[in-house]
Amino acid sequence: MARPKLAVWKFSSCDGCQLTILDCEDELLEIAGALDIAQFLEATSEVKDGPYDISLVEGSITTAHDMERIKAIRAQSKVLISIGACATAGGIQALRNFADVEDFTRAVYAHPEYISTLAQSTAIADHVQVDFELRGCPVSKHQLLELITATLAGRKPHVPRASQCMECKRAGAVCVMVSQGTACLGPVTQAGCGNLCPSHRRGCYGCFGPKETPNAVALSARLAAQGATPPQLRALYRSFNAGAADFATESRRHD
Amino acid sequence: MSASPAPALLIDDPAVLVEALQRQGWRVIGPQARDGAITYDPLTPGATLPKGLTDTQEGGHYRLGAGDPGRWFDYVVGPQSWKKHLFPSRQKLWEASRTDDGFAVTPVQDDYPKTAFFGVRACEIAAMEVQDRVFDNGDFADPGYGRRRAATLIVAVNCTRAAATCFCASMQTGPRAKAGFDIALTELATGTGLLVEVGSDRGAEIVDGLDLPRANAAHRAEAEAASAAAAAMQTRAMPPGMAGVLAANLDHPQWQVVADACLSCGNCTMACPTCFCSDVEDVNDLSGDHTERWRTWDSCFTVDFTYVHGGAVRRSTASRYRQWMTHKLSSWEAQFGTSGCVGCGRCIAWCPVGIDITAEAAAIAASPVPKE
Ligand code: SF4
Ligand code: SF4
Ligand code: SF4
């Protein structure tokens, strides 16, 4: 049987999720053995033509050209998986969605007239049909391997949509919200990072985006009772997953 | 554990007992002050027990702070329970590899040396007895749980102080352990040591080797009074008869009121010493030639928990909260013959938004809705 052809694509992003693929050091040779890596510019300049069995897409859609490109990629891909907060929610660059993008281009570029960009940074799924969204800023190596393995085996990947709190408790991490009053997005955030912040006594920043059935209104009410101001609450929801619908709606409530 | 007529004794320093257990080859797991809370972790030889600490607990609030410097056990239950040792949060059940004509399964067994739990509170003993009925009940037996439980020695500590979240007195599970321990300690007036009671033959053997002085009737009376004081200071209580009240109020409007505040985060179930639900997950490698089955703690607050063909049964948070609370306080009795709640208060303190099971129960008990 021919090895399935894998393509890795980049849109507006920092490349961190692609680096997570390269960070699968121990498994990388195995991945290369199981898959025909047909397109992965971060790793190799060798490019093979489509169609592709699996496309991993990093980055958000921020230009008119991106909108055309993603449609062409979709047309060549049997399975299309978006990876990371940019591809699944618009990324940190979706902060523009809450402001006037021209204010940003004027402030950042010497010649803003050369910049041709869309007013909004949006997720891949806003433009084409996506078969699976892998969350995270960046994605977790463990979940990425599970996703690739499951896709090859033809089964559903085990990527739970439950809260970060469940991971804290399974790991025996002492809750920072309860034990030190630290604002934490964990109760409304999907698990997956491997407990990075709470195990270092920091609140969760929501890198993996909203969990299933998030109740951000109730969390904000509690944080406000503990002293958080509306600008602090707004900033809390408005970071890597600012464009995710549940976080966007909640941050707007504190405008 | 057979009852033992051994007389009560006195010990000045509980660390002496920890060292004796370690000398006799027991792995001792006990309280440690870590990350601003009391956790239950293995005590390395020479590790000191926390002293002079106390806690303040409320709905969604826990702080560990300085207390009377002469006291050993003025804190009560913390974020973790002993469940994490008897029923690990993540556990490999077996592995399998592809063979020429199918596959071969290799069972795996975790390493659980003979272990002493040091500092088990009365509600925690009750919680273990609740889980004993879950994991070995005639219809079903979990061999791993049974093996770990049998290899575990219990050194209880009777509470002489309660937190604002405690309600063991109303659940009749504490604050004084009546059985279920090998050795029980009660801290007496500061500086006068601890009463040592023996609950089993193996407990007696350990204590015998220490050559401790005998306690007198006054010491015993003081210990009983200290526990009675811990019961009297409890500000929360579970209303009586909740099993029937909840079963008759499945459509009560309070379920939606609590759902509006609930994050469906699952903290309450993970912190609860009796919650036992788990998920199993198969993890195969890239080649597809090797697979492992893992069991992890799960929660009735997730959507996947009731996923059956085509979708989840309990989609609303109201239905999930109701499932949790009615199971704890009502259907558990029909299923296992006890309440599923021992009144430890963890689900109150460790709920990020401070939802209080006693208050929710009281709200429903106060205004029952007649069933159609
Ligand atoms: S630290 Fe944050 S993520 Fe962890 S249990 Fe507490 S609220 Fe949840
Ligand atoms: S339901 Fe709450 S109070 Fe009752 S045993 Fe569980 S954590 Fe403790
Ligand atoms: S009751 Fe509290 S701890 Fe339990 S799921 Fe709801 S918000 Fe989380």
Image: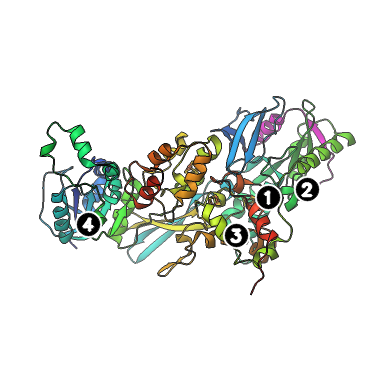
SS type, badge 1: loop
Q: Are dots 4 and 3 in contact, CB under 8 Å?
A: no
- Disc 3: CA contacts within 10 A as few (<14), some (14-19) or many (>=20): some
Marks 2 and 4: in contact by CB < 8 Å? no
Residue of label 3:
B254
Q: Do badges 3 and 2 share one subunit?
A: yes
Instruction: Please give the chain letter of the residue carrying mark 4.
Output: A
- Distance of mark 3 from mark 1, alpha carbons? 21 Å
Mark 3 / mark 2, whichever is N-terminal: 2
Looking at numbered disc 3 in the image, what kind of residue is underneath it? Answer: Gln
Disc 3 C-beta below 8 A from ligand 3: no
Task: Please name whichever residue, A215 or B174, is drawn nearer the observer in this view of the structure.
Answer: A215
In the drawing, what numbered circle is on residue A127?
Answer: 4
* Disc 1 CB within 8 Å of nearest ligand 2 atom: yes
Q: Residues within 10 Å of mark 2 (few under 14, many from 20)?
A: few
- In the displayed structure, does residue B140 sit left or right of residue B366? left
Q: Are marks 3 and 2 in contact (CB under 8 Å)?
A: no
Taking depth in this image into account, of A145 and B308 the one nearest to the observer is B308
Element assignment for label 4: loop
